[in-house]
Amino acid sequence: MTATPVRHPAVAGRFYPRDPEALRQEVHTYLSRTSPHKTIRALGCIAPHAGYIYSGHVAGAVFSTLEIPQLCVVMCPNHTGMGRPLAIMSEGTWETPLGPVPVASDFAADLKQRCPLLQEDSAAHRSEHAAEVELPFLQIRQPKLSFVPIALGTGQFEALEQLGVALAEAVTAYGKPVLIIASSDMNHYESDAITRIKDQSAIEPILQLDARALHHVVTQQHVSMCGFGPAIAMLTAAKRLGATSAELVKYATSGDISGDRDMVVGYAGIIVR
């Protein structure tokens, strides 16, 4: 028998607290800033993945609003450049300071069957922060959480669309609620004024559930939205699953926290249902 793969935290103590109690407290603080009376069952969402001090309040606004089912798919960009362009881990567990999160191996195996472009690859995930930072929010909101991690290092529309179609088929076959999370920050390292304009141009097609238009805006208007690939796959899946609307829950830039308006990163929290 082979040992079950364990993916250890890559950015605990940097992007978020390493101490379990401090982490739990911080996440609860971000979740409680937006505590709706009634949570929403959504098909998908976009949540940021920067250090919690900068984007935790936006992520908290998303995850406090949603019902978090026991199974989530977390798609993120590949910042490290390591591994395959469409990299999935379909076995094992991910450790966070709050404890282990099992990979939903049956769902992952079915998804790989439906999307041959997906390749088993732990290297793409080993040092990548963008899926990891979502997990403490999900763990606190759903103690019975399992998930499927996918890191995307391609911006090719057809490949992303193919993944989205396969996701919709796998969710339909699964027959129980699944939340598809696109982990993404928005425009990077331009002034606050320019970033807000560029981000608005990318948010508009997302709110229209128009994946192809999002791809066009990001590539033609040079919007450095790192997770536009996950967003395209999520939108494609959600539309096929019957999504009819999207809502911008919260928008901010790093300048709102740091006070530096010369060079910022944008963060959007969006729910698709």
Image (spheres, rainbow, N blue to C red):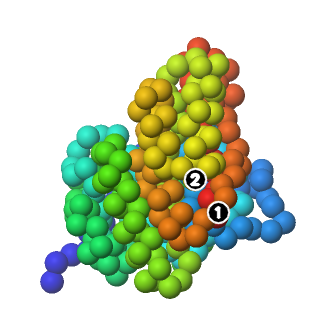
Amino acid type for the residue under numbered disc 2: Leu
The residue under the point 50% across, 42% down is 214
In the image, 179: left or right of 162? right
* Residue under pointer 1: 244
| Position above or below: 136 against 268 | below
Could you tell me which quadrant the C terminus lies in?
Answer: bottom right
Between 223 and 242, which is closer to the camera in this rendering?
Answer: 242
Give the structural element (helix, strand or loop) at label 2. Answer: loop
- Mark closest to the chain's N terminus, 2 or 1: 2
Q: Distance between the residues labelled 2 and 1?
A: 8 Å
Read off the residue under disc 2. 209
240 shown above or below 232: below
CB within 8 Å, label 2 to label 1: yes
Say which residue appears at 45% left-offset and 37% top-offset: 216
Outermost residue toward the right in this view: 37
Q: Is residue 117 left or right of residue 106?
A: left
